[in-house]
Image (spheres, coloured by chain):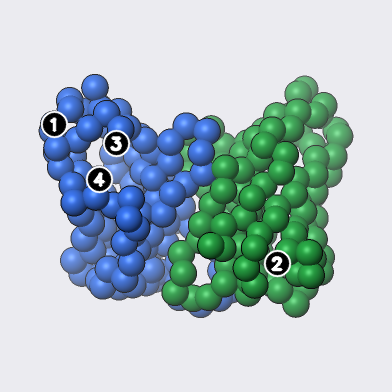
Chain colours: A green, B blue
């Protein structure tokens, strides 16, 4: 299975702090994607990192990928209350396999 | 076309009734996916289409579930003889075939079976 497993399951931080979420997976991948889901809404694609990349930035997001350890991390800097959401990682292997999601990390940012 | 549209947003039905949901993907996206999500869990894959062809179905998709994408544009997901266990959020996503893109999800249809 190419499902990712997020850790921790839940994270609560104060506004302004940084939030770090981790993802582990078991198979070889082509890329790994991170998604955010606000309560009662669909998922939103945040960032994609390819297997030959080690780090990628997008605004306040920083993603790292270590293919030797089959792990990735998502860092949100200077968190805001609006970052409160569930975050999912999705390792992706090949074009014909659909993304498989784990249970995600529930982030709560307290103002 | 600004995104993936799902209709209805909410549906309450009595056990045993049939329900149908609709998904309108981004027009140039040739792949369309259906997922189901229950509270506290991640989305579970149900099925996907490339154009009008249904390429894969999950074992979660019992005989009571059927999905179509007749002209390779919008898709429908029908659940026959609904059960309380079918209560969930049903999510649709679309994608242009290729390795570089993420999925674009709709806002989902929340089904409650009473």
In the image, B36 versus A27, the foreground residue is A27
Q: Quick check: B51 left or right of B63? A: right
In the image, A23 versus B71, the foreground residue is A23
Q: Position of residue B1 (x, y in %)?
A: 40, 59
Q: Is residue B85 visible?
A: yes
Q: Quick check: A101 left or right of B97? A: right
Question: Do the residues at pointers 4 and 2 share their chain?
Answer: no
Q: Mark 2 or mark 3, which is nearer to you?
A: 3
Circle 3 is placed at which residue position?
B86
Marks 1 and 2 sit apart, C-alpha to C-alpha, by: 44 Å
Q: Position of residue B95 (x, y in %)?
A: 45, 66
Circle 2 is placed at which residue position?
A49
Circle 4 is placed at which residue position?
B21
Q: Mark 1 or mark 4, which is nearer to you?
A: 1
Chain that bears disc 4: B
Graded by Cα atoms within 10 Å as few (under 14), some (14 to 19) or many (20 or more), the crowding at tag 3 reads some
Graded by Cα atoms within 10 Å as few (under 14), some (14 to 19) or many (20 or more), the crowding at tag 1 reads some
Residue at 76% from the left image edge and 23% from the top image edge: A110
Circle 1 is placed at which residue position?
B16
Chain that bears disc 2: A
Question: Do the residues at pointers 4 and 3 share their chain?
Answer: yes
Q: Mark 1 or mark 2, which is nearer to you?
A: 1
Residue at 64% from the left image edge and 63% from the top image edge: A26
Q: Mark 4 or mark 3, which is nearer to you?
A: 3
Q: Which structural element holds mark 1?
A: loop
Graded by Cα atoms within 10 Å as few (under 14), some (14 to 19) or many (20 or more), the crowding at tag 4 reads many
Q: Is residue B4 visible?
A: no
Q: Quadrant of residue B19?
A: top left
Marks 3 and 1 sit apart, C-alpha to C-alpha, by: 11 Å
Q: Which structural element holds mark 2?
A: strand
Marks 4 and 3 sit apart, C-alpha to C-alpha, by: 13 Å
Graded by Cα atoms within 10 Å as few (under 14), some (14 to 19) or many (20 or more), the crowding at tag 2 reads many
């Amino acid at each position: 299975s190419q499902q990712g497993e997020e850790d921790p399951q839940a994270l609560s931080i104060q506004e302004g702090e940084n939030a770090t979420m981790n993802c582990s997976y078991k198979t070889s991948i082509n890329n790994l994607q991170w998604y955010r889901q606000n309560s009662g809404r669909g998922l939103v694609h945040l960032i994609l990192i390819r297997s030959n990349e080690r780090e990628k930035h997008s605004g306040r997001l920083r993603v790292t990928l270590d293919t030797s350890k089959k792990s990735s991390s998502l860092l949100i800097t200077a968190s805001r209350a609006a970052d409160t959401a569930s975050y999912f990682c999705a390792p992706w292997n090949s074009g014909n396999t659909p993304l498989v999601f784990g249970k995600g990390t529930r982030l709560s940012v307290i103002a | 076309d600004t995104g993936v549209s799902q209709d209805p947003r909410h549906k309450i039905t009595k056990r045993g009734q049939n329900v149908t949901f609709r998904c309108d993907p981004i027009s140039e996206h040739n792949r369309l996916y259906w997922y189901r999500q229950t509270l506290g869990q991640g989305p579970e894959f149900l099925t996907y289409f490339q154009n009008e062809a249904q390429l894969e179905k999950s074992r979660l998709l019992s005989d009571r579930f059927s999905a179509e994408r007749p002209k390779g544009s919008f898709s429908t997901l029908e659940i026959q003889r609904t059960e309380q266990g079918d209560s969930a959020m049903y999510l649709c996503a679309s994608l242009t075939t290729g390795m570089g893109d993420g999925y674009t999800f709709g806002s989902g249809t929340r089904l409650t079976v009473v």
